[in-house]
Amino acid sequence: IGGGDARKNRSGDTELGYNLAKAYWGNGYCTEAVKAIIAYNVAQGTTYFVCKHAQDNVRSSRVIQKCGFVYVKDGSYTSFDGLRTFVDKEYALHIKRFEMDVDGEWFCKIIRGDKTVELRLNDEKRRGIKICDYIVLNNLDLTSDVRKCVVRVTQLHYFSDFNELYTSLDMSKCGYGAAEQANPDDMLRYYSSKRQAQYGVVGIQFELLAVM
């Protein structure tokens, strides 16, 4: 029904393009696909993208802006046969990329959609994370066929320690099932009480974009 890709253009930038049969417009397919293409390339280390659309293509403009692109300038492009020239609008996307390791059991919950908040110490590395940043999560279970996934930060929740976090957030979003007891002491295996008091903690809420 369509396709898309990201490739180096003549300027050396990673340019994103896509197309979709008209019968399938209006279902959000292009937005979802573009986010996945961006996420896959972010996992490979790309942090700058460009994209363009014909000036009168309002639907394409919406897709690009929903994916975080920012308008840069008007430009033009020529048809494949070289006979026609069209005015276009050109956009760019700068991404701030982070990388974290996740234990296998929690990683599985993330890719199943059972966990949409990652719990971390709010140390120097995490303090740089902002809404809309991308995080590559690496699966520490090296026996798994699924080695990493890419998420986009949608919200940040700050607390003094995990005791406060566990009483404030919806634990079902943090990976706990209905039959599981959510206990803040579970986080002591990763972060001591002393480090929690020193840095505070953060719940990183995200949307899952790609699994690989």
Image (tube, rainbow, N blue to C red):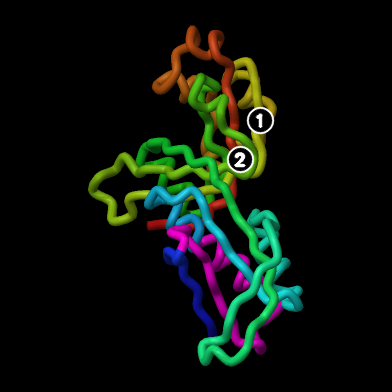
Q: Circle 1 sits on which residue?
A: 157
Q: Position of residue 112 (x, y in %)?
A: 48, 54
Q: Is residue 138 above or below residue 156?
A: below
Residue at 42% across, 64% down: 8
On whether residue 22 falls in the magenta region, the answer is yes
Q: x and y percent of residue 108 in the render?
A: 41, 48
The relative height of residue 31 versus residue 192 in the rendered view (above or below) is below
Magenta stretch encompasses residue 143: no
Q: Between 53 and 33, which is closer to the camera in this rendering?
A: 53
Would you identify the image quadrant in which residue 131 lies?
top right
User: Contact, CB < 8 Å: mark 1 with mark 2?
Assistant: yes
Residue 157: tell me if it is visible.
yes
Residue at 46% from the left image edge and 70% from the top image edge: 5
Q: Amino acid at mark 1?
A: His
Residue 27 can be seen in this image: no
Q: Position of residue 88 (x, y in %)?
A: 68, 72
Q: Which mark is residue 109?
A: none
Q: Residues within 10 Å of mark 1 (few under 14, many from 20)?
A: some
Q: Which residue is mark 2?
A: 205
**Mark-to-mark CA distance, 1 and 2:** 8 Å
User: Which element is circle 1 on?
Assistant: strand
Residue bounds of the magenta highlight: 11-36
